[in-house]
Amino acid sequence: MSLSADARRIRDERLTYLTPDKLNRLEGTLRETLRLDVPGDVLEFGVALGGSAVLLAKQATAAGHRFAGFDVFAMIPPPTSEKDDAKSKQRYETIAAGESKGIGGDSYYGYRDDLYADVIATFERHGLAVDGQQIALVKGLFEDTWPTAGSKSVAFAHIDCDWYDPVKFCLESVAERLSTGGVMMLDDYNDYGGCKTATDEFIAANPGFRFEPGVNPIIRKVVN
């Protein structure tokens, strides 16, 4: 399947680490969720450069849904759980040492002086106004910002935060407000052990949710 025009532009502008397969599944799953009139906000945890957030926000607002993106908009916090694997900790050491490479030779996004302003500018360049209402970008640690973010119900959440603790927090917190038929999509399930462990634990403990494998697996709420 070929990429949408918006996804091609995002990749051309080096705004996402997502592969074409992941982008297709991200857009297609959200499109189907909105077509089924699942109520609630569209969310992303782990905005980075804002590429996938732009794609989600365009679909969400066109269908009358609110979009909110959550990130520290700075250096990613370290993996601190014993359930994070060696690969995760090695990856963080590279980032913390200032040795991480950006997309296509660009500077790594976590090293930017004002990533938050850069992402807002990206949204504006793509015709999206970050007004704090219909589209919000929420800066800070998830556990600090989520409780007052104002999402009463959730239709779709893209969870792209790598490590065990933040993935576990997002799954458990969003699940409480996820509408029946709603979806949580995991970007890092096949890449980092902590994300996989947090996801597997959640599925084992929550029989009302169905796991659907793939390049970026889906957890779908099937019963109230």
Image (cartoon, rainbow, N blue to C red):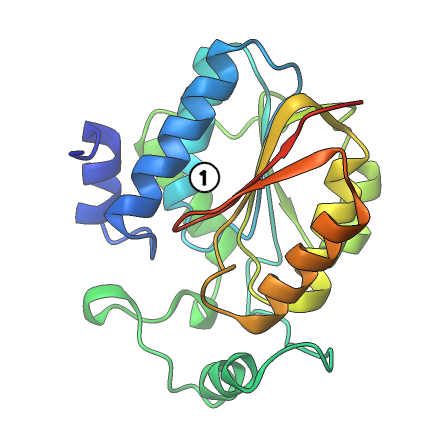
| Residue at the (72%, 65%) spot, across then down | 165
Name the residue: 19% across, 29% down.
5
Tag 1's secondary structure?
helix
Q: Relative to residue 68, is residue 61 drawn left or right?
A: left
Task: Give how far across and how far down residue 107 sits, in percent.
Answer: 31, 71
Q: Can residue 141 be seen by looking at this rendering? A: no
Question: Could you tell whether 127 is left or right of 11 in the image?
Answer: right
- Taking the spot 34% from the left edge, 52% from the top edge, the residue there is 18
Instruction: Check the image and report above or below for 74 versus 9.
Output: below
Amino acid under disc 1: Ala
Q: Which of 222 and 72 lies nearest the eye of the viewer?
A: 222
Q: Which residue is mark 1?
A: 53
Front residue of 220 and 100: 220
Task: Say left or right for 114 vs 68.
Answer: left
**Figure check: 92 above or below 127:** below
Q: Position of residue 49 (x, y in %)?
A: 40, 53
| The C terminus lies in quadrant | top right
